[in-house]
Image (spheres, coloured by chain):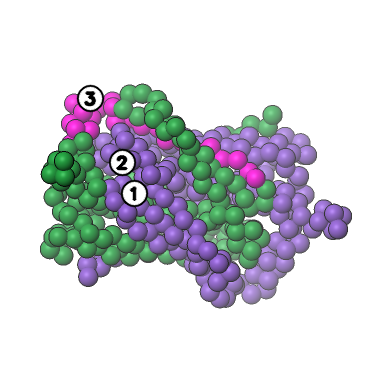
Chain colours: A green, B purple
């Protein structure tokens, strides 16, 4: 039993299943079409809450998640909130860190690199005069983000660095945060 | 007591405190310099976890949060995970929804618009062949995002729409997701 697990998982990723998914999408490219979603409800002040459950992917609506994931947002007192959750800019740093990490773990699994530790710290610089409407000379979001990864594993350091580089080239959120995405906003006022 | 609360908060935002913050930063623009952070640790497979606590802002390191916020990430089974949390792309949708919502609530508070309900649904389209390394013809991230807001309040519909428009012009995450941010990645291999 232990032997079987050792053979089919690497870095906690079932790489046979991963190759199976890759082969299926290669053979039928339309299975690669996904749609992810989040529904957000305002609670009061800077407190709002996102619910994340269903998505479309691999040719069908996915109903495998029995419970939704819930993430609360807030602002600290200095930004006139009650600290009901990470603020949205901090949540974006989480999304970026998580995506780079998952990408590098999957890349390592595919390349037979056994990882033992992955940690990252992300910092984003923001002049809040933009978002607060006090200045048009600074942007609203982060002017820049720095991510520092600490990676250990049973591979030469050069190989570990290559895995992180490859992860950047394939990370969905890294692509979105560095290159931007068109966002269409519609408003209903029932 | 109730009267005092009614006078100083609107939409759950203490607008006198909001104006106080705005005045202080106007008078001393360097108080607008903030740095937000997230630290992420890989747990195993597609499971990783971000911890968010301290930040720098208003001229000092903020230590007001006694406990860190924790957000788990994961992937669903079809993407070779165990559903240990929203996936990173879903987390990005949360960040965007939360930021647009907070921005519109603050804008409404400043413009004396009483809101009664704000809900939003965000959808992002992704051909996962990009992130999975199967195609260079599709991008890794969402090709586009649609956000649908449903806003109710004690104001004409036109005014409510204006508030949402203004929120887009000031939202930090909307700026980052639509325009992109430079991200520098460093790797340590101790």
Circle 2 — which element?
loop
Q: Quadrant of the N terminus of chain B?
A: bottom right
Q: Position of residue B18 (x, y in %)?
A: 70, 61
1 and 2 marks on the same chain: yes
Q: Is residue A34 magenta?
A: yes
Q: Position of residue B57 (x, y in %)?
A: 56, 70
Q: Which residue is mark 3?
A: A28
Asked if the residues shown at circle 1 and circle 2 are in contact, with their CB atoms under 8 angstroms apart, the answer is: yes
Q: Position of residue A102 (x, y in %)?
A: 30, 49
Q: Which residue is mark 1?
A: B47
Q: Give the Cα separation between the discs numbered 2 and 3.
A: 21 Å
Residue B69's label in the rendered image is: none
Identify whether A58 is placed above or below B12.
Answer: above
Circle 1 — which element?
strand
Q: Which residue is mark 2?
A: B81
Boundaries of the magenta span: A19-43
Residue under the image location 63 percent in, 34 percent down: B150
Q: What chain is tagged by disc 2?
A: B
Circle 3 — which element?
loop
Give the crowd class for mark 2: few <14, some 14-19, many >=20 residues within 10 Å. many
Residue under the image location 28 percent in, 39 percent down: B80
Residue under the image location 56 percent in, 66 percent down: B65
Q: Is residue A62 magenta?
A: no
Give the crowd class for mark 3: few <14, some 14-19, many >=20 residues within 10 Å. few
Q: Quadrant of the C terminus of chain B?
A: bottom left
Q: Give the Cα separation between the discs numbered 3 and 1.
A: 28 Å
Residue under the image location 16 percent in, 45 percent down: A2
Residue A140 visible in this rendered orientation of the protein: yes
């Amino acid at each position: 039993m232990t032997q079987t697990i050792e053979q089919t998982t690497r870095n906690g990723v079932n790489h046979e299943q991963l190759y199976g998914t890759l082969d299926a999408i290669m053979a039928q490219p339309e299975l690669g079409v996904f749609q992810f979603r989040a529904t957000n409800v305002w609670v009061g002040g800077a407190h709002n809450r996102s619910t994340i459950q269903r998505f479309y992917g691999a040719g069908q609506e996915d109903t495998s998640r029995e419970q939704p994931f819930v993430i609360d947002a807030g602002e600290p007192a200095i930004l006139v909130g009650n600290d009901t959750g990470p603020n949205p800019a901090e949540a974006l740093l989480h999304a970026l860190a998580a995506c780079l990490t998952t990408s590098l773990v999957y890349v390592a699994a595919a390349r037979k690199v056994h990882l033992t530790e992955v940690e990252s710290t992300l910092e984003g610089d923001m002049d809040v005069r933009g978002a607060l409407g006090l200045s048009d000379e600074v942007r609203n979001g982060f002017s820049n983000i720095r991510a520092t990864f600490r990676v250990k594993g049973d591979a030469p350091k050069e190989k570990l660095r290559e895995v992180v580089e490859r992860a950047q080239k394939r990370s969905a959120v890294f692509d979105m945060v560095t290159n931007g995405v068109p966002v269409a906003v519609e408003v209903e006022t029932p």
